[in-house]
Amino acid sequence: MLESEIGHAVSIALDNAAPLACVATIVTMLVGCVVCDISARRLGADFSLGRLEKVELDRALVLYGKVSTAFDRGCTSTAHASL
């Protein structure tokens, strides 16, 4: 009798495993979103670029300036060669 009850309990647990896993995943994702939202609000929108990011931004601005100047002069082939 006890073996059949245990077998029945295991059967029910296996049948409900997929929906239970889905619910657990959704709850975990919601908790993660709330935690990220709270930490983002705590940090605020004030940020600064790192050293390498600043170098890359300066490089991109110089390249943009070269291309923009070349387009203004109307000579796109020299702009490509100078990049």
Image: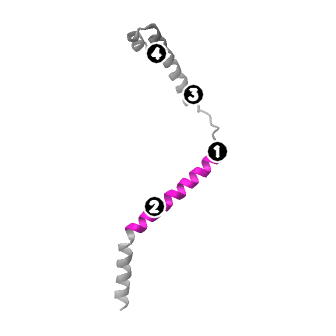
Q: How many angstroms separate mark 4 from mark 2 (CA)?
A: 49 Å
SS of the residue under disc 2? helix
Q: How many angstroms separate mark 4 from mark 3 (CA)?
A: 20 Å
Q: How many angstroms separate mark 4 from mark 1 (CA)?
A: 37 Å
- Name the spot of residue 66 as percent of width and height, x first: 48, 14
Q: Which circle marks residue 69 in the picture?
A: none
N-terminal-most mark, 3 or 1: 1
How would you classify the magenta stretch by its main secondary structure? helix
Examine the structure image and report whether residue 31 is included in the region drawn in magenta: yes
Q: How many angstroms separate mark 1 from mark 2 (CA)?
A: 27 Å
Label 4 environment density (alpha carbons within 10 Å; few <14, some 14–19, many ≥20): some
SS of the residue under disc 1? helix
- Mark 1 lies on residue: 43
- Name the spot of residue 81 as percent of width and height, x first: 39, 12
Q: Which residues are magenta?
A: 18-42
Residue depth check, mark 4 versus mark 3: number of the one nearer the observer:
4
- Mark 4 lies on residue: 67
| Residue 28 horizontal side relative to residue 50, left or right | left
Q: How many angstroms separate mark 2 from mark 3 (CA)?
A: 39 Å
Label 1 environment density (alpha carbons within 10 Å; few <14, some 14–19, many ≥20): few
Picture mark count: 4
Above or below residue 50? Residue 3 is: below
Quadrant for the C terminus, please.
top left
Residue at 42 percent across and 8 percent down: it is 74
- Name the spot of residue 3 as percent of width and height, x first: 35, 88
Three-letter code for the amino acid on which mark 2 is drawn: Thr
N-terminal-most mark, 4 or 1: 1
- Mark 3 lies on residue: 54
Q: Answer yes or no: do the residues labelled 4 and 3 have beta carbons within 8 Å?
A: no
- Mark 2 lies on residue: 25
